[in-house]
Amino acid sequence: MLVFKNKTAAIRIMSLKIARSEYIGHPICEMIGNQNSLAELLRLENRVTTVNSLLQVFQSRKMAALLFVGFSSGLPILLIFKTVQSWMSDAGTDLSKIGWYGSLIGFPYAFKFLWSPLLDRYVPPFMGRRKGWLLIIQSLLVVSIGAMALQDPAKNLDLLAINSVIIAFLGASQDIVADAYRTDILSEAEAPVGMGIFTAGYRVALIVAFAGASKLFENVFGAWQPVYLAMAGFMLLGLVFTLFAPETESTDLPPATLTDAVVLPFADFFQRKGFIYGSSVLLFIVTYKVSDAMMGAMSIPFLKAACFTQGQIGDINGFMGIVAAIVGALLGGVLLTRISVFRGLWLFGSLQAIGIIFYLLLAQAINPDPAITDLAKVCQNFTLPPFSYQLFILAINVENFCGGMESTAFGLFLMSMCNKQFTATQIALLSSLMALSKLIVAPIGDVVKSIGWSNFFWLSMVTIIPSLILLVFLARADKNLGTTLKEY
């Protein structure tokens, strides 16, 4: 019979059923002679349990559904931004019109919280509040994306813009419901991995919608209209998988009235979190993404100024970088099963900031002038310094890999802030706040002209520090409040 001086350890051994009769005489029991051996045994048992749990989660029907819901959510956005802009450029559309087009299309995504209460309040007569709305919106997306095959920006740009705005509205609406579906269907134990799989599906759609569409245009069709018919087929594929997706298990009833759907989500959020904590959460959401927004706005212009070709940028950033982001998203989900969401946000945000150092090294090696506008002339006879191409590959892949992990943690954080009765409205509001970071960095081009590329990358690295300090406050406040976030 084994005797333990540490009673707590003995109880834990009993709870793990290691002290059952079949273990008596087993060689592993002979090694339990001190506390260190016991701790090692418990650690190994916990690792086996965790691996088995992860395998069960990855094999579940929920995860397959989230992969395709994430794919459907990610498909529309690049089809009406980068892909349409390529189409407009090929048609000789004026640059100022392309710029105004981009601002018009971004409006539904920035203000989707305005109609999200409708999707919380009203329940379709089939397949429930979340799945029913997904099927309705995805059906309309199939039709509206297919209708792009009837457009021609060279003949009637207005019709193409109207069609694109409809897709943007439906795409933003799909995001509202997809985020709510993901939040409602996942248990706390499944949430980290589920968020990673959803993000991976979203990133795969980005590859299909831009790199895939471009390849179809160049190598198969030679025209953009049939490309959009093919993209409508991909959306139809997502709709089919939604049909077989499991319904949410939430027992929370929708708001009783539309007024409740508008007012109660905001009142509920501050009632649960408190005004100071809730306001700090909103401030954190805006500031945490500022560094990411700065890089998103200026990374491609920098690479063009450094005389990398469009083909090089497309192949590495449009394909390899997104693959790195998918791997990062999945790895982030697995890691978040072992660490809290606060630690994940802090760690992944810090890593992404540190990863910008490869852009900094590239800027110092090439030293491009941000004031030059005639890049074709400057780059005509330009020769890249040694190891610049390798730094270019590292910069894109490290940034995207860390960004994938950060996106998983950030999405999990937003999910944890929501009451499942008002998921659509609350998560739409919180995710819309991220758009403010893009407004904050609107003058960043003028900043780059003033301070140069190297100083810009230093600035991008340190910009995340205030949000990391605020994150420490949120973690301590959450612990004192005893909220459910610490369970994630």
Image (cartoon, grey):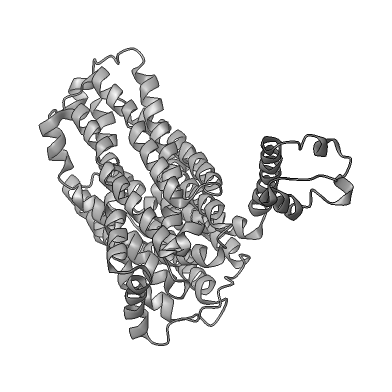
| Residue 350, image x, y percentages | 36, 38
Whether residue 338 is visible here, answered yes or no, is yes
* Camera-nearest residue between 175 and 78: 175
Q: Residue at x 27, y 63 (%)?
A: 279
* Camera-nearest residue between 283 and 385: 283
- Which residue is at the far left? 450
Q: Residue at x 40, y 45 (%)?
A: 223
Q: From what the image shows, is residue 251 above or below residue 338?
A: below
* Camera-nearest residue between 420 and 32: 32
Q: From what the image shows, is residue 50 above or below residue 140?
A: above
Q: How many marks?
A: 0
Q: Residue at x 68, y 47 (%)?
A: 6
Q: From what the image shows, is residue 159 above or below residue 77?
A: below
Q: Residue at x 19, y 45 (%)?
A: 95
Quarter residue 378 falls in: top left
| Residue 374, image x, y percentages | 16, 28
| Residue 472, image x, y percentages | 34, 49
- Which residue is at the far front? 5
| Residue 265, image x, y percentages | 36, 75
Whether residue 156 is visible here, answered yes or no, is no
Residue 488 lies left or right of residue 28; in this view the side is: left
* Camera-nearest residue between 445 and 428: 428
Residue 245 lies left or right of residue 218; in this view the side is: right
- Which residue is at the far top? 386
